[in-house]
Image: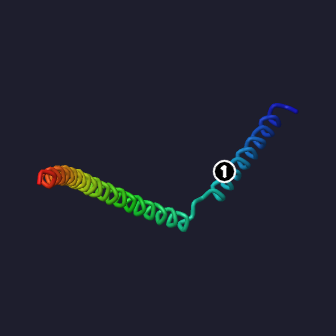
Amino acid sequence: MDRTEFVITTAIILFVAFCLGWFANWLVHRFTRVSQADMDQLERMSQELHEAEETRDQAITYLQQREAELTNQLAQTEAELAAAMEGLRDARHEAEELRVYLERVTATR
C-alpha cells in the first residue's frame, strides 16, 4: 500500500465516520424533538400550576384572617368570662354576708 492509497483509504474512513456521526445526530434529534402538542400541554400545566398557587395563597390569607378573628373573639370571650366569674364571686360573697347578717338579726330577736 503506497502513500496515495493510504490517504484515500483514510479519507474514505473519515467520510464514513462523519456520515455515521451525522446520521446518529439526526436520529437523536428526531427522537428527542419536542412536539407542539407537548409544548401546549406544558404551557397549560404551567398555567394550571400558577392558578393553583394563587388559590393556595388566597386560602392561606383567608385562614390567617379567620384565625386572627377567632383569636380576637376568644380573647373577648375569655375577658367576658373572667368578668362574669368575678361578678359571680362578688354576688356569692354578698349573699354569704347577707345570710350571716340575717342569721344574726334573727338570732337576736
Where is residue 51 shown, x and y percent of the image? Answer: 40, 63
**In which quadrant of the rendered view does residue 14 lie?**
top right
Q: Nearer the viewer, residue 56 or 69?
A: 69
Q: Residue at x 19, y 49 (%)?
A: 93
Q: Is residue 94 left or right of residue 49?
A: left
Residue at the image point whose x is 17% and y is 52% from the top: 103
Give the quadrant of residue 66: bottom left
Point out residue 61 in the picture as x, y percentages from the top left corner.
32, 57
Residue 82 percent across, percent down from the top left:
23, 50
Q: Residues within 10 Å of mark 1 (few under 14, many from 20)?
A: few
Q: How is the image coloured?
A: rainbow
The N terminus is located in which quarter? top right
Type of amino acid under label 1? Asn
Q: Front-most of 24 and 31? A: 31
Per the image, label 1 sits on a secondary structure element best described as helix
> In the displayed structure, does residue 7 sit left or right of residue 97?
right
- Camera sees residue 11: yes
Q: Nearer the viewer, residue 39 or 17?
A: 39
Q: In the image, 99: left or right of 2?
A: left
Check disc 1 and report the residue beneath it: 25
Q: How many marks?
A: 1
**Residue drawn at (70%, 53%), measured in percent from left and top?**
23
